[in-house]
């Protein structure tokens, strides 16, 4: 298991963590000033900046892009809406390639409006990923399936376990991988077995934050590493035991706490916690 | 699959559904007036009424008891607190027997305070169930393990999938069963397979409500059947396909909606939805 305490070399910041504190340009500058080498931009933030300008700023600050968030949402319009979803996803793949992101994180979508057909949604996701895959392969961007916590099965993602993501990787072959986020998966009694099953080749992103024992909001009350109940070293040991040697990407959606603090304070805290509790 | 549309014969009300609307005596009276044959009392409500008086009222109104909620909480005090938790659970078993409940629903407990040891908590739960089992067997009360939604893994129950509950039943043998609640399990891609695995002997309670597409509170924003996204007939078909022929027990914790409505209105709505959408 790697020793993270000495430097920041494997630390990346997902820009959602500080989305309320500034523009992407300001966030890039803050990350570089904090001595953090990695960044994973969200799509709305990059688009607001302009893709070419965002790519230029990231390069100019010497940052490594660890992912691009996010594609997916295959199910929102039901089967009839898949073509439009695919068009949008192809643009997301192109944007990921433009900023040098190794992967596009896929939040696959939940149930279509008025639908209760969860197996149907899951089938549509598989079809959508398969249809997107040739474009992603050609662009050299891995489609990183992110299993989301089961509490998002209705409204965000019907892929809710690492087992499901592994099954999709089995079915789809080269060009797909997995974004493993401790927030979504920490509870899973099958987690360590499925991490081993995924292995080095499939795990293309590792997202960290914490689960607060008292969670007040389903979407945006994630905790800073160390403030919650996730045994981060145990999960990281499993991930690294499977061969993962990439970045630890901090992604904290926190409208009640961290989004209200100054950019520099949040980033400094990420560094300190990364070095001491992860 | 049974036809529920003609009468209420398999309908039961979990008293948490109307916990804000009256005493247990008033709830018992309301359930009987609504022509509902089953009841599943919560422990705090029964204790406030008095166990003997509650038992007498339930009998006097001709209601069938479909469960008693709830035992468990083995982990709150860590390993050192297990003996006290067991004492309390033995009293809960005795209360269940006193009201003629076939099962005690087990909300097994989450992480102990300041703990991040989820595997340890799960191990403690297994030990607690095993230690409680002789008393439960002697009382003729089945310990109904209730897998809770993964969003409660930290603070309520570290048994979060039907697969885990089945594994515990495999390990513990006669006297344990499963309380299957659609709210906690609807998202599970392995649900139908695990229902078949559980089978008629293990499924001793079937709880219904709905998952609201926009859920505003982690604990108490459950929906009335038909108002959410759960495919209730699909799950009931699987449960009955496995041989289950018992009650459908309505358990809705809803501080934002149903707890604010009159008792009779809630019960009438339960009847109407039970007959039309379940």
Image (spheres, coloured by chain):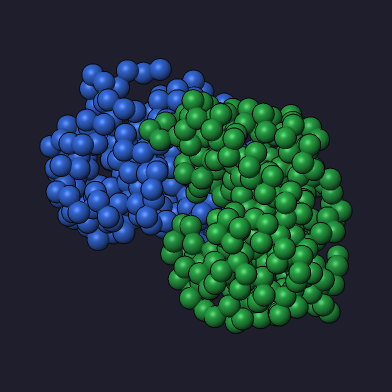
Chain colours: A green, B blue
Which of the image's four quarters has the N terminus of chain A?
Answer: bottom right
Residue name at image x 51 percent, y 54 percent: B151
Look at the image and tell me whether residue B205 can be seen. no
Residue name at image x 40 percent, y 43 percent: B213
* Up/down of A267 relative to A241, above or below: below
Q: How many marks?
A: 0
- A216 with respect to A273 (left or right): left
- B181 with respect to A124 (left or right): left
Residue in front for this viewpoint, B5 or A236: A236
Look at the image and tell me whether residue A10 can be seen. yes
Residue A209, quarter of the rendered image = bottom right
Residue in front for this viewpoint, A205 or A27: A27
Residue name at image x 83 percent, y 79 percent: A6
Q: Residue B261: horizontal and vertical position, in percent?
A: 17, 50
Residue name at image x 37 percent, y 44 percent: B212
Q: Residue B223: horizontal and vertical position, in percent?
A: 33, 44
Which of the image's four quarters has the C terminus of chain A?
Answer: bottom right
Residue in front for this viewpoint, A266 or A27: A27
- A55 with respect to B111 (left or right): right
């Amino acid at each position: 298991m790697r020793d993270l305490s000495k430097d920041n070399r494997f630390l990346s910041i997902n820009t959602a963590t500080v989305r309320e504190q500034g523009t992407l340009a300001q966030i890039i500058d803050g990350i570089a000033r904090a001595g953090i080498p990695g960044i994973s931009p969200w799509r709305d933030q990059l688009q607001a900046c302009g893709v070419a300008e965002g790519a230029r700023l990231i390069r100019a600050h010497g940052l490594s892009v660890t992912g691009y968030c996010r594609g997916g949402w295959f199910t929102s319009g039901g089967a009839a809406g898949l073509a439009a979803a695919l068009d949008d996803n192809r643009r997301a793949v192109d944007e990921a390639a433009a900023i040098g992101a190794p992967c596009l994180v896929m939040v696959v979508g939940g149930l279509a409006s008025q639908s209760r057909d969860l197996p149907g949604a899951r089938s549509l996701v598989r079809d959508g990923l398969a249809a997107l895959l040739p474009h992603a392969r050609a662009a050299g961007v891995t489609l990183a399936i992110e299993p989301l916590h089961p509490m998002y099965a209705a409204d965000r993602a019907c892929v809710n376990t690492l087992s499901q993501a592994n099954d999709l990787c089995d079915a789809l072959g080269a060009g797909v991988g997995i974004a493993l986020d401790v927030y979504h998966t920490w509870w899973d009694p099958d987690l360590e077995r499925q991490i081993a099953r995924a292995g080095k080749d499939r795990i293309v992103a590792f997202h960290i934050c914490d689960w607060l024992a008292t969670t007040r909001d389903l979407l945006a009350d994630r905790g800073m590493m160390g403030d919650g109940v996730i045994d981060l070293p145990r999960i990281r040991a499993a991930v690294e035991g499977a061969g993962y040697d990439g970045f630890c990407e901090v992604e904290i959606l926190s409208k009640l706490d961290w989004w209200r603090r100054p950019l520099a304070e949040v980033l400094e805290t990420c560094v300190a916690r990364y070095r001491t509790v992860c």
